[in-house]
Image (spheres, coloured by chain):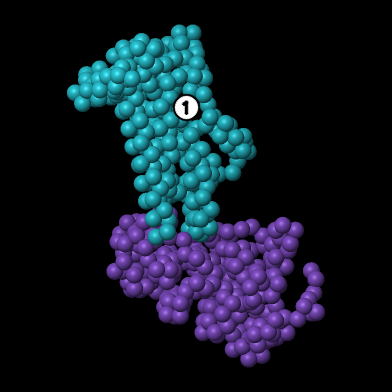
Amino acid sequence: MTGLTDPASAAPAILPLGLEGLVFAAGGKTLIKGITATLSAGSRSIVLGPNGAGKTLLLRLCHGLIRPTGGRIVWKGAAGADPALRQAMVFQRPVMLRRSVAANVDYALRLRDLARADRQQRIEDVLTATGLRRFATQPARLLSVGEQQKLALARAWALRPDVLFLDEPTASLDPAATRAVEEIILRIDAGGTKIIMSTHDLAQARRLANEVLFLHRGRLCEQTPAPVFFTAPRTAEAGYFLEGKLFPQLRRINP
Amino acid sequence: MSDLADAFAAAAMLIWSLDQDLVGIVLLSLRVTLTAMAIAAVIGLPLGGALAVFRFPGRSAILITINALMGLPPVVVGLIVYLVLSRAGPLGALGLLFTPAAMILAQAVLITPIIAALSCQTISGLWEEYREQLQSFAARRGDALATLLWEGRIALLTALLAGFGRASAEVGAVMIVGGNIDHVTRVMTTTIALETSKGNLSLALGLGIILISLAMGVAGGTYALKLAAERQRSA
């Protein structure tokens, strides 16, 4: 298990991640409305908010899958290193390549030009740690959705990223699979990888968050340490969300 | 009516006895069409994939052209290849006209657009599905293209079969550039055309039966591949 506890390399992490006035607009609508925040290493950041708040969009912007139409994303610790090679993402619906479980992990590792022996060791480590080792030679697409999501986590974990983005990774899973996925996330976190995860599931946010970024209609309402957020949120929007109420339309502030 | 029945009986006899002329013609046809398909695959698969994955100026123009070329009349392909290979043409010095190589070239020209267009369709669908995941892995576009060609291998085989079907059935192009020379460039379709006009129905019918069986085989193979691809997708 030696391979799992030590993130990317001896090089310092690309964190902190700075968002500077981040804006994303598409089809005449502004979906992310000027988000400024700093995300630092050493804590699990949960992006929380109702459906359509812009959680997925924010994660995709941070991960570089789409370009912001305004503002900047700065990896403050990158120091010349390519940040794209030091981060990974697990999507809501796992995307499995049409090959075996082990080959799926190997594929991601080969893109990073790692030596064969190193790849073999990492595959062995992550498949063992996620309980997928017995499926190693099976076609990945024959796994259940829960197991596929575990494999997506294993694949990301094997890359030993500085930052792991997770976009509602348990949204389509049953409670048992959800629990298993959360346990894996905690172990990846313990290995030194920064976790940035979106969810609309309050219970899950309570279980996993060190800090909460609460999003509402494309705005970052607050970035608050978890214990404070769940007892005394700073904004009315978060208060309503925690009580399970709809935010009143009257209060709507037009952009 | 009995003439027709006699012709059928004679045709069956030719196939059953593996008549030398007939076997020679069938083997030449397969050699020409399979080689043309291989060449068209080497060009058409990466071209179609690249059109699906890369965005560049002129991409739409190429796509429209390829789609238009899918319906290219074989005789026109034959004419163009004839002009290119004829003594006065740009490749005249190679002396390829009226050889199997000329027929391979003509059929490859004919089916490359088909294979490119069909593989572009297949790869576009896969790209949609894999795009963000591959981007997340920091895969370069070239790596992504190679990955998608492999991921779509079964669906792409059906594109190759479509090309094979079209090439094996066409007569105009190989007739013009091959010249239908006995034992040299005579393939199934050109033989059928010639023998029918000569009234030698048994050989024409024998070859016709083989061509139809081949087409059935291709259709069956395509169907089986589609089933396999669907099973893979849903799995």
Give how far across and how far down residue A57 sits, in percent.
Answer: 62, 65
A133 relative position to A68: left or right: left
Q: Nearer the viewer, residue A240 or A127?
A: A240
How many numbered discs, if any?
1
Give how far across and how far down residue B188 sits, in percent.
Answer: 34, 22
Q: Nearer the viewer, residue B25 or A27?
A: B25
Mark 1 belongs to which subunit? B
> What is the quadrant of residue A123 in the picture?
bottom left
Q: Nearer the viewer, residue B124 or A158?
A: B124
Disc 1 residue type (three-letter): Leu
Residue in view at x 66 percent, y 90 percent? A232
Q: Colour of chain A?
A: purple
> Helix, strand, or loop for circle 1?
helix
A227 relative position to B99: left or right: right
Q: Residues within 10 Å of mark 1 (few under 14, many from 20)?
A: many
Quadrant of the drawing holding the N terminus of chain B:
top left
**Residue indicated by mark 1:** B110
